[in-house]
Amino acid sequence: MPDILFHQYDSSPFSEKVRVCLGVKKLAWTAVDQPVIMPKPELVALTGGYRRIPVMQIGADIYCDSQLIVRELERRFPEPTLFPQGDQGLAHANAMWSDRALFQAAVAIIFGGLGDKVPAAFINDRAALSGRPFDPATMQAAVPHMEAQLRAHVALLSDQLADGRRFLTGDRAGLVDANAYYNLWFIRSAYPPAASLFENMAHVAEWLERVKAIGHGERSAASREDALDIARTSEPMACTVAPRDAELEGKRVTVAADDYGRDAVKGVLVGSSEHHVSISREDSQTGQVIVHFPRIGFSVTN
């Protein structure tokens, strides 16, 4: 079984989503803890400039964004599945709700609640990441609206659980549970007073405890320098390019997120599908690596 190096930090909400998936799959993995804010020199050496957390590394293959990490985990380690009802497409589509609407409500409630307790260094870092002001005071003004939004979102979970099912799609946990859970985990861990918004909603507290009990699989640790060494001494996997991208095969392209954290990564296009794009690049610290990105939420230009 290939070693999973997971570049993360413990308070990262999107890392928690993947950690729950690792728990569902009962996988062993190695945490490579990254700083919460820039600089992240070892990470950007691996990715070519992409700075968002989490990132998964398997040898010299680097997977960016939680949506692609989850997809790759399912491809490499299909059992136990993250899609116990066979609803793979809908479960991935569900992440567009949990990673955007639900996550934005959680962010506003957390940082609006923390207010002037948010460190200036964190504010400056997230402003640079998003390309716009990160202003807890503005978020604080939006808290009443976002609290109502959060309860409306969580009511959907309560409705789904109302028939007595243990998890959101049935008796077995899957990606849909991880998608929803990490946002409520984020609120509970980062700003506990706001957990009262949802913990008294029917069926929700019990479901949260069931997902928490899944755990995170078997965790070990490695240094950031270890991760660079592993990349340098590994060979990336073979890739294929989808026919519709044939004109770009072997050419230099630029990949960037289209929402926030738009750091451009340049490399040679060596793989693609409807769901991903892969570019080959070299760095003096890593040797040749292939960096993989999801299609949804990322642009590819040449």
Image: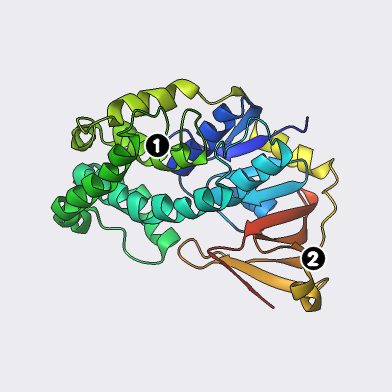
Quarter-wise, where is residue 156 in the image?
A: top left
Please name the residue that numbered disc 1 is placed on: 181
The residue at the point 83 percent across, 49 percent down is: 237
Image location (x, y in percent) of residue 208: 36, 28
Image location (x, y in percent) of residue 35: 50, 41
* Image quadrant where one finds the N terminus: top right
Q: Is residue 92 above or below residue 165?
A: below
Please name the residue that numbered disc 2 is placed on: 241
Q: Is residue 137 left or right of residue 293?
A: left
Q: Amino acid at mark 1?
A: Tyr
Q: CA distance from mark 2 to mark 1?
A: 35 Å
Instruction: Name the element at disc 2.
Output: loop
Badge 1 local density, few (<14 within 10 Å), some, or many (20+)?
many
Q: Is residue 204 left or right of residue 88?
A: left
Image location (x, y in percent) of residue 268: 78, 67
The residue at the point 58 percent across, 43 percent down is: 86
Q: Amino acid at mark 2?
A: Val
Q: How is the image coloured?
A: rainbow
Furthest toward the front, the residue is 163
Quarter-wise, where is residue 250 in the image?
A: bottom right
Please name whichever residue, 125 or 140, is drawn nearer the observer in this view of the structure: 140
Q: Is residue 98 above or below residue 76?
A: below
Please name whichever residue, 81 or 164, is drawn nearer the observer in this view of the structure: 164
Image location (x, y in percent) of residue 260: 45, 63
Quarter-wise, where is residue 181 in the image?
A: top left
**Residue 123 visible, this orientation:** no
Q: Is residue 196 left or right of residue 19?
A: left
* Image quadrant where one finds the C terminus: bottom right
